[in-house]
Image (cartoon, grey):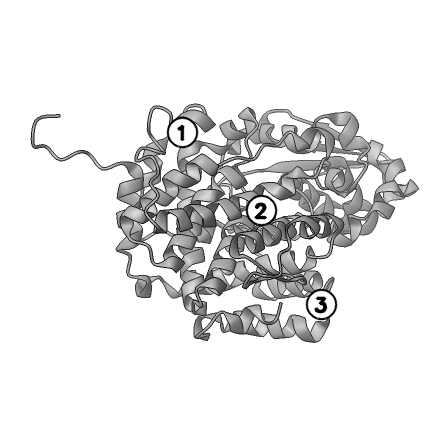
Amino acid sequence: MREGAKPVPSYSEQLSEYYFNINTKRIPQEVLDYSKLVILDYLGCAIGGADVDTTKQVKQIFMDRSGECTVFNGGKAPVERAAFINGAASHALEMDDASFFAGGHPAVVIISAALAMAEKQNSSGRELMEAVILGYDMMTRVGRGVVPDHCFDRGWHPTATNGIFGAALASAMLMKLDAKQMANAWGIAYGFASGNLECYADASMTKRLNPANAAQGGINAARLASVGYSGPRWCFEGRHGYFTAFTDDPTPERMLENMDYSYYGIMNAAFKPHACCRYNHAPVDSTLRIIREHELTADDIEKVVVDICSMAVRAVVEPRELKYSPENIAGAQFSLPYAVSCAVLYGNASVRQYTQEKIQSREVRDFIRKVEMIHSGEMDRYLPDIIAASAEIHTKDGRVFKEFTKFAKGDPENPMTDEECRDKFMALATMSVNEKRAWEIYDTVMKLDKLGDVHELTRLF
């Protein structure tokens, strides 16, 4: 660099200036409206998951009623602990939103952090919405740069490792940090980034803790930055930066695409109608269309052959002995043959099918072996942004029916309707609260942009 030349700003410096200078009043109405559905979907998952066994265990360790932030169905806790507990709760049912561009499940990290921080800061409903929108945008930028498939190959959980940067930004926006502090927050967050997927191998429960830890880490990074703590300037593209440490063949330049406020990553959030890993959704949709169109029952079926993409193999196909004999709910959520069996036997793969009783039932154990999982390579041509699958049902009388699903129900290209989103929220929320309270929460979220204080919402939890 010649003497007197200005240093090239780092990615974090360029992005922090971008977010610091945004005129949030110009966020398009369709983006604001969609953010309400995203927050509603998160709340259904979090309230519904607040009383499952793993969440109770997390509360047992991390509850601290001396705090000022609301824990779903559990009182108060300090801001970072509230985010941790709510992050674990919202990921427990495996029905939280997903974004292939962001590389995982944004809501459980970003909204868990934003909701707790908004409550601590006495933010308005509109400020919460804006923080969530920009948090999604940041996580999506990191996801585009890091190539999530390569993170998976290394064993990282991009929901947590990418999501912590979105949680840090959402927290920073609510705390009204300046650009330098935002950039430092990401550098600090990089030091906190973690979360592995070895739990896929044995159906252990740690996947639910990954977003919890990232939500907490994002808050702590912003708080440290607010008092002057520094983080590495080149945290993304540096020699030992995020793109070197967490992935192969990254495309970091994609982080800086569309820096004209014309694109918002939250619009790529996909909602889940089925209570299982997103890789199971296209196979379930294909299976359901066949059995409904041809009025088939489990007794009619000789076998179901499901063709999936390479990215699905490591999550819901292997190890095969575990996927064909899931021992617990976490194992069933990541079992492709179990999800397809539920579709055939019960006509859906809802949260009501993911119980220990159903997992151990004779009808499931008998049918699950009729599901064949193959990877022909045909579905890989839609990767990395489309998780397609096909299902082929062979009947005992010799008929063969085949259905291909390019976009699963809930994808932005095949969206759930507002009514379906509402019904999903009500079904999940009423697992833990009465119907009257669930409707109060729904109505409050629908007018979130009009709330002067987010406590008008959190008091309902």
Q: Secondary structure at mark 3?
A: loop
User: Dot 2 surroundings within 10 Å: few (below 14), some, or many (20 or more)?
Assistant: many
Q: What is the three-letter code of the residue carrying label 2?
A: Ala
- For residue 20, what is the image quadrant? bottom left
Which residue appears farthest toward the front when viewing the image? Answer: 66
Q: Position of residue 460 (x, y in %)?
A: 61, 71
- Which residue is denoted by mark 2 in the rendering? 212
The picture places residue 420, in percent across and down from the top left corner, at 63, 62
Does residue 407 appear in the picture of this structure?
no
Residue 430, how many percent across, how many down? 72, 65
**Camera-side residue of 285 and 436:** 436
Q: Earlier in the sequence, mark 2 or mark 3?
A: 2
Give the number of the disc on residue 243.
Answer: 1
Q: Is residue 236 above or below residue 178?
A: above
Label number found at residue 221: none
Q: Residue at x 70, y 39 (%)?
A: 205
Label 1 – label 2 distance at C-alpha = 22 Å
